[in-house]
Image (cartoon, rainbow, N blue to C red):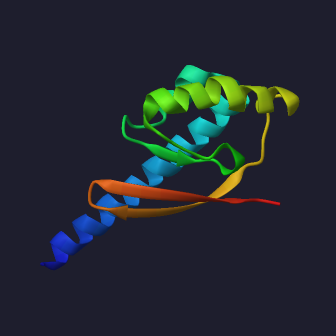
Amino acid sequence: MTKIEELEKRLENLESQDAIRDLHRKYIYYVNSQKWDEVIDCFTQDATADIGMHGSHQGKEELSVLFKSKIAKVNEKWNGSHFVLQTIISTDGSKATKRLLPVL
């Protein structure tokens, strides 16, 4: 791999991570604003979300049910806000993984 190719790969990786962070900010805004359709649009068709006490859910259909029923009820109790989380992002080609750590 040439130096240029290595730099292009690093730049692509950094741009991907930045895009994921931006998507996370949108997700937080939409959850706090209770815009559930927009929340679901933050996920890919084959996404998997493991949300603590709500368990693991896969695909937009399952996530839609989760957010519009269970998360919406929890969100109402918290007056439309929730903990903001720090992100740990890993990228590998066309795949990305994001883990969240609560800020206490």
Where the N terminus falls, by quadrant?
Answer: bottom left
Q: Quadrant of the C terminus?
A: bottom right
Circle count: 0
Measuring from the top left, give residue 56's x and y in whole percent.
Answer: 55, 47
- Vertical position of residue 94 compared to residue 71: above or below: below
**In terms of image quadrants, where is residue 79?**
top right
In the visual, does 47 lie left or right of 13?
Answer: right
Q: Tell me where residue 82 sits by quadrant.
A: top right
Residue 93 place in picture, x, y as percent: 26, 60
Residue at the image position 53 percent from the left and 33 percent from the top: 63
38 displayed left or right of 2: right
Q: Position of residue 40 (x, y in %)?
A: 51, 29
Q: Position of residue 48 (x, y in %)?
A: 46, 46
Determine whether 69 is above or below 82 in the image. above
Q: Is residue 79 left or right of residue 43?
A: right
Q: Name the residue at 45% across, 31% down.
A: 60
Q: Nearer the viewer, residue 12 or 49?
A: 49
The residue located at (50%, 57%) in the rendering is 98
44 lies above or below 88: above
